[in-house]
Amino acid sequence: MKIREVAITVGKLDAAAAFFRDVLKMPVAEQVDRVTVTAGFSRLVITPGEQFDGVHHLAFGVSPHDFDDARIWLKQRVDLIAAGDSEVVQGPPGWDSRSVYFLGPEDILLEFIARESDSGLPPRDGVIPLPFSISEIGISVPDTMAAVAELTKVLRLPIFPPQEADFAAVGDHDGLLIVVDQDRTWFPTRVHTAARGPVAVRIDASHRHGQVALGENATITAASVQS
């Protein structure tokens, strides 16, 4: 399951564009009413919107070969968020991953994640650790298990560990929807609650087609698009 596009809103579009362009050095296309950030085969589309409670969570995938250099590069540009006594966070059982977390524009919780399943990817060609995908997107819902049931029934997406009452993953190593209770705080800050703002996700999931609305704010569309 590949996350092809994520659309979110922010209060200050210019500041969001500047962060991704100038701090993370990601490709950014600016238009009057939107900013498009390219992360490999994924796109993050940001548009202006009204203020909402909580913050979004996005994880960008990087090659395991680049992770250590990416952490050092990021540490020179942003404040990495420690979990306990370490800035490097090991993923849950079954994930085989390492992550670093930091805050983006309007406190969006951002993550660079390296999964061992991507060890076949070559090291980057250059100094800047450009991500090759949006690896995860957080989805805030009133009922976590009901949302997971809808995603698996309508879009036939696989579940992924862990499956808890307020936190559940749907998808696979190529892309995960992180479905959480709307009152849950994000790890590792433990102070930022999940966003109640609009988020639209377009996924490419092996010839599965359909659309699911989760709560009032989230829409997941599955369509086999190879571009």
Image: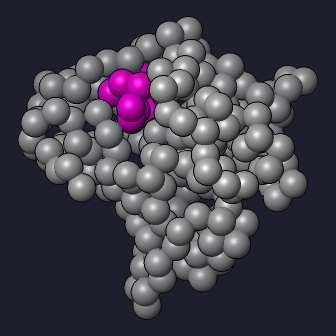
Q: Position of residue 87 (x, y in %)?
A: 82, 32
Q: Nearer the viewer, residue 111 or 216?
A: 111
What is the image's colouring?
Answer: one colour
Q: Looking at the rendering, in which quadrant would you find the C terminus? A: bottom left
Residue 166 shown left or right of residue 105 in the figure: left
Seen as rendered, the residue at the extreme bottom is: 32
Please tell me how many numbered marks the rendered image carries.
0
Q: Nearer the viewer, residue 151 or 100?
A: 100
Q: Is residue 22 above or below residue 135?
A: below
Q: Position of residue 122 (x, y in %)?
A: 54, 36
Q: Residue at x 83, y 43 (%)?
A: 72
Q: Is residue 30 visible?
A: yes
**Residue at the right extreme, as displayed:** 85
Q: Is residue 66 above or below residue 44?
A: above
Residue situated furthest top in the rendering: 93
Q: Position of residue 101 (x, y in %)?
A: 71, 41
Where, quadrant-wise, is the N terminus in this rendering?
top left
| Residue 211 horizontal side relative to residue 136, left or right | left
Q: Is residue 170 left or right of residue 127?
A: left
Picture residue at 33% right of the left edge, 27% below the top: 171
The residues colored magenta run 168-180
Quadrant hosting residue 70: top right
Q: Is residue 171 magenta?
A: yes
Is residue 173 a member of the stretch shown in magenta?
A: yes
Q: Is residue 1 above or below residue 211?
A: above
> Is 204 on the left-hand or right-hand side of 71?
left
Residue placed at 46% from the left, 39% from the top? Answer: 135
Magenta region, main secondary structure: strand
